[in-house]
Image (cartoon, rainbow, N blue to C red):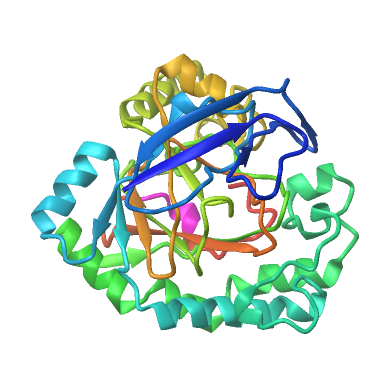
Amino acid sequence: MYIKATFYFLSVVSQDIPSLILYLYSSPQHFIMAPSVIDVTMQSSQPSDAIKKAPGKAILPDYIVPLRPTPADTPMSEIRRRYEEDGYVWMKGLLPTADVWQTRKTYFEFTGPTGLIKEGTDPKDGIYCGGDWRNWVAPGPFRESLKLQNSNLEYQKRMVEAHAAPWYMAFASHPVLLNFIKDFTGWEKTTPLKRSIFRPNVKGGEPTGIHYDQIFLRGGPPTALTAWVPLGDCAINGGGLMYLNDSVSIGEKIEEDFAEAAKDFTDEQRISAFNAHMMSGGFLSKDLREFSKKWGRKWLAADYEAGDVVFHKAFNIHASAVNESDVIRLATDLRYVETEKAFDERWMENWKPDDNL
């Protein structure tokens, strides 16, 4: 199936034309590029008329291609081959959709009293209340940089508590996930890392910058398996993940350079994602277009559906896009290691805003 996406670098776009508004992104302001219209045709298994906004300068169409989907009934040998070849595998419909939607509903029921979702709507839908997105930034250093650490305290409290809630812990250890990981990896026993993060991205909010996971897991070898799980459907303009194509070797090279630059640091400094050689937030950049041009790689974008899971390697480079919709993009990134093998033990505590990870 082919998608014809029309890219409009304009401040105003006709509502009846399928379009993509790509902004120059420099938090907290958006800047509009000079008018230009470009048509591009792409092959995809997921129909859509738009690709995502993303942090950084507007991405040229030539730098965007579809993420490759893998049906859940694909032979395991082929799943492993794709994972090794691509550095990720996007498993379609792996999880029972009812369980995914229930987790989404429970999260918004739990945070609903804070005013996050629109009054009178079904918590499962996760319809954004509107207003200034900065009110809904997670507690932690970024919120503090916005001078909002003392506002919306009930939301901050509930967001932290949700990460230790029994219903969330149960989802992170979902038997379908654990059974798949056992078959996929061949591990005798799997340990879910307790530290995982809900990411409720609201319309227009700050997206996640460019990074690879090992930046934050340097206290152990790069053997953790990440499962990015959208909790509900995430349309192409809804702020899902974008992966840099064929980027594992790039991540490995960048980490080698970081290690060399930090060779005289203390152990604590060396493994920190926020040491003197790192960008704010541990990111590599917030400019997807320039990063793509620098490394000669394209970004992979997709529509995601409830039940999908993307597994990716520790050095696979990725970032999130800006959510353009009124539906809150709720997702979580879960990580798993082989039991009794070395791993970053700092990740065996539930997420807290001041854990410096």
Task: Examine the image and state in which quarter residue 214 appears.
Answer: top left
Q: Nearer the viewer, residue 315 or 235?
A: 235
Query: Vertical placement of 262 versus 96: above or below?
Result: above
Is residue 346 magenta-colored? yes
Q: Is residue 91 left or right of residue 289?
A: left
Q: Residue at x 42, y 62 (%)?
A: 193
Q: Residue at x 60, y 43 (%)?
A: 208
**Residue 121 image point, x, y percent:** 72, 81
Q: Is residue 203 left or right of residue 220?
A: right
Q: Nearer the viewer, residue 344 or 285?
A: 285
**Residue 257 image point, x, y percent:** 43, 18
Which residues lie in the magenta part?
Answer: 343-347
Q: Is residue 316 visible?
A: no
Q: Nearer the viewer, residue 208 or 37?
A: 37
Q: Residue at x 69, y 53 (%)?
A: 354
Q: Is residue 320 visible?
A: yes
Numbered disc total: 0
Query: Vertical placement of 157 versus 243: above or below?
Result: below
Q: Residue at x 47, y 42 (%)?
A: 242
Task: Examine the image and state in which quarter residue 131 appears.
Answer: bottom right
> Outermost residue toward the front?
16
**Residue 46 image point, x, y percent:** 38, 54
Q: Main secondary structure of the magenta part?
A: helix
Is residue 103 magenta-colored? no
**Residue 194 image point, x, y percent:** 47, 65
Query: Vertical placement of 176 versus 340: above or below?
Result: below
Q: Is residue 254 left or right of residue 82?
A: right
Task: Examine the image and state in which quarter residue 146 appears.
Answer: top right
